[in-house]
């Protein structure tokens, strides 16, 4: 899952708009915008890393599995969730 920098900026701007609509007082909106942008970017990097690791793990299996097949999707979801939980130590 990859988002362009512009897409991240757009999502952060929408979040900021919603916060203002809800009446949240933003004492330092530029700092918040910067932190949200960094957080989005960091989390997307983690998701991309997990995606690459899961794809590699499926690719190393002794039995070739066609990407997009039902079996591949089930393995991808299972391995992705396992890796996500391992990283979060859930």
Image (cartoon, rainbow, N blue to C red):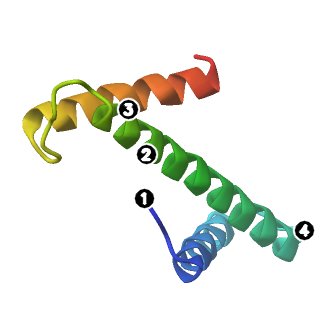
Label 3 environment density (alpha carbons within 10 Å; few <14, some 14–19, many ≥20): few
Tag 2 or tag 3, which sits nearer the N-term?
Answer: 2
Residue at image x 82%, y 67%? Answer: 26
Residue 27's disc number: 4
Disc 4 to disc 3, C-alpha distance: 46 Å
Give x and y (percent) for residue 9: 62, 78
Q: Secondary structure at mark 1?
A: loop
- In the depicted view, which residue is nearer to us: 88 or 64? 64
| Residue 13 found in image quarter | bottom right
Q: Are marks 1 and 3 in contact (CB under 8 Å)?
A: no
Q: Are marks 2 and 4 in contact (CB under 8 Å)?
A: no
Tag 3 or tag 1, which sits nearer the N-term?
Answer: 1
Task: Report which residue position mark 1 lands on.
Answer: 1
Give x and y (percent) for residue 55: 35, 42
Q: Secondary structure at mark 4?
A: loop
Mark closer to the observer (2, 1): 2
Mark closer to the observer (1, 3): 3
Disc 2 to disc 4, C-alpha distance: 37 Å
In which quadrant of the rendered image does the C terminus lie?
Answer: top right
Label 2 environment density (alpha carbons within 10 Å; few <14, some 14–19, many ≥20): some
Residue 53's disc number: none
Task: Report which residue position mark 3 lands on.
Answer: 57
């Amino acid at each position: 899952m990859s988002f362009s920098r512009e897409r991240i900026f757009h999502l952060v701007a929408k979040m900021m708009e919603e916060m203002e609509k809800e009446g949240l007082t933003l004492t330092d909106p530029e700092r918040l915008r910067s932190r949200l942008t960094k957080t989005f970017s960091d989390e997307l990097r983690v998701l991309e890393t997990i995606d690459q690791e899961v794809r590699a793990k499926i690719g190393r299996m002794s039995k070739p599995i066609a990407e997009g097949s039902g079996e591949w999707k089930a393995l991808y979801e299972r391995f992705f969730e396992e890796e996500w939980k391992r990283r979060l130590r859930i």
